[in-house]
Image (cartoon, rainbow, N blue to C red):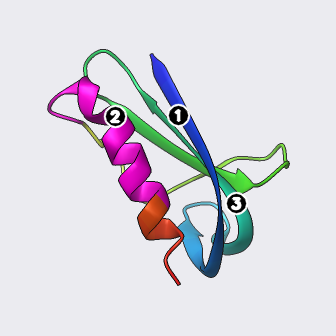
Amino acid sequence: MAERSSVFTASHGVMTTEVGVISGELELRTNCDNHGLLTLRITYHGADEWYTLPGNGHRLHDPRDHEVVHRILATVLARP
């Protein structure tokens, strides 16, 4: 299982399943297994409690795309 992590600032916030919108300095962590199943989690940078992004069943056609998808997600979530 591959894991990627990025820290970014979300000035307009990011919706989470557990607590609604969070904003500020956040960390996105994505995991992708060998079958392409993608797990998306987010937290306040440096915090211990992780939240999930809405939706489920995220699956990549090719697990090798994980790095690119992670970078795209982090970029989109950081947009002003």
Could you give the CA–CA distance between mark 2 and mark 1, rounded to whole angstroms?
8 Å
Residue at image point 78% right, 47% down: 49
Residue annotated with mark 2: 66
Q: Residues within 10 Å of mark 2 (few under 14, many from 20)?
A: many
| 12 up-or-down from 65: above or below | below
Q: Residues within 10 Å of mark 1 (few under 14, many from 20)?
A: some
Assign a secondary structure to mark 2: helix
Magenta stretch: residue 64 in it?
Answer: yes
Three-letter amino acid code at the position of disc 1: Arg
Q: Is residue 55 visible?
A: no
Q: Earlier in the sequence, mark 3 or mark 1?
A: 1
Assign a secondary structure to mark 1: strand
| 16 up-or-down from 39: above or below | below
In this rendering, would 71 be left or right of 34? right
Magenta stretch: residue 48 in it?
Answer: no
Q: Which residues are magenta?
A: 60-74
Three-letter amino acid code at the position of disc 2: His
Mark 2 touching mark 1, by CB under 8 A? Answer: yes
Residue 78 vs residue 30, the one in the foreground: 78
Counting from the top left corner in percent of width and height, residue 40 is at 48, 45
Residue annotated with mark 1: 4
Q: Say the numbered circle drawn on residue 26.
A: 3
